[in-house]
Image (cartoon, rainbow, N blue to C red):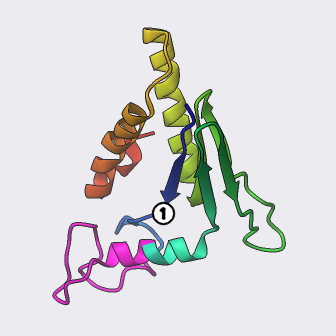
Amino acid sequence: GCNIIVILITKVHVSPFSKRKVMFRNQYDNDVATWSPQGRIHQIEYAMEAVKQGSATIGLKSKTHVVLVALKRSTSELSSYQKKIYPVDDHVAVSIAGLTADGRLLCKFMRTECLNSRYVFENPLPVSRLVAAVGDSIHPLIMLWSIQTSMY
């Protein structure tokens, strides 16, 4: 079977102790669980802006083949292009749209999960379980900024 996993990586939260305090406009943009009085979640808006600045990635799947396409853009004339498509296992590959550093870390996590499955069960990890494992590892990071550095 052919499988496509497209991961969208954005920095949803910047620590209030970070030197980059430009993003923080008010007391309601400290995390993704805080609504402003206007009914907005500012961290989601920041993530949507980051997506607009990222490059496109497309995955197409048929019964026998998969095609992953990623637009490679350099951020400036002095920087080089970044790799956007990564193989994870024999049956899974990832195309990254957004911050490639975070995407590479997620890809490393996914490779480890696939290797563990092959070692323990002598079978490839089902994609549904891989997606669940990624979700289980990312969800606490999204909700609590204080533990963001503990995943990797």
Q: Residue at x 50, y 34 (%)?
A: 110
Q: Is residue 40 magenta?
A: yes
Near-viewer residue (105 or 51):
51
Looking at the rendered structure, the kind of residue marked 1 is Thr
Q: Is residue 70 above or below residue 150?
A: below
Q: Residue 67: image x %, image y %? A: 67, 48
Q: Is residue 24 above or below residue 105?
A: below
Q: Quadrant of residue 91?
A: top right
Q: Quadrant of residue 12?
A: bottom left
**Secondary structure of the residue carrying numbered label 1:** loop
Q: Residue at x 35, y 73 (%)?
A: 44
Q: Is residue 66 above or below residue 69?
A: above
Q: Residue 112: image x %, image y %? A: 51, 27
The span picked out in magenta is: 21-47
Near-viewer residue (66 or 63):
63
Near-viewer residue (25 or 69):
69
Q: Residue 49: image x %, image y %? A: 49, 78
* Prevailing secondary structure of the magenta residues: loop
Near-viewer residue (112 or 71):
71
Q: Is residue 84 above or below residue 26?
A: above
Q: Quadrant of residue 143?
A: bottom left
Give the residue pinned by disc 1: 10
